Amino acid sequence: MLPIANLMIEHRLIERMIRVMIAGTQKAKASGKIDPAFIDTAVDFIRTYADKLHHGKEEDILFKELAERKISTEHNRIMGELLEEHIFGRKTTAALVAAKERYVKGDASALKEIVTHLETLTSFYPRHIEKEDKHFFIPVMDYFDLAEKDRMTAEFNEFDRDFTRRRYVEVVEKLEKK
């Protein structure tokens, strides 16, 4: 199995959570209110599953390995964009948290900002995932031989060892049923 298979499988769960977040955003727009616990759950998923677990493997393993190799200008450019996009996602998530905190303290006008940040994240992640899946992950595997791919897969598995992936699958399943 290619190491990127793990990353692409993770993308499918992220896409499912994005659909849940879109539904939650639409509900907030229609009702004029939002459940702060929903925001907390979405933020935990983004920060822990999408960023720490998923982006962590990309940045700490795959991108580091690629940085040590002579890769094409195009792949180097895309890798730089992906890193910038990870930072953008972190900043947008932090802004969502700040808006939610103001909303919880009674600032009803923060709802508009919450909706804006949710819409930003839910439009950003599908484009980011498509770039990785269709324009980066598969082609960059050509820079590695079979033994290096196997070693990277083992590193990904070791990285995942401390995470309870099942917990995030259950979170998304529970939200999908609501």
Image: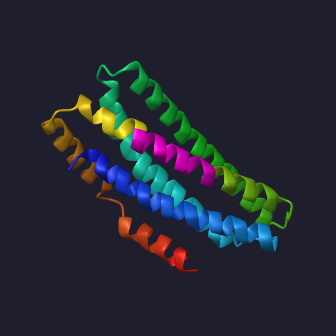
Is residue 132 highlighted in magenta? yes
Q: Main secondary structure of the magenta part?
A: helix
- The residue drawn where x is 54% and y is 34% is 84
Q: Provide the residue span drawn in magenta.
A: 122-134
> Height in image: 22 above or below 158?
below
- The residue drawn where x is 81% and y is 58% is 112
Number of numbered discs on residues: 0
Image position of 73 (left or right of 118): left
Query: Residue 41: where, in percent of width, then height?
Result: 57, 67
Residue closer to the observer: 175 or 154: 175
Residue closer to the observer: 79 or 98: 79
Query: Residue 23: where, in percent of width, then height?
Result: 64, 68
Quadrant in the picture for the C terminus: bottom right
Is residue 154 highlighted in magenta? no
Query: Residue 44: where, in percent of width, then height?
Result: 54, 61
Q: Quadrant of residue 152?
A: top left
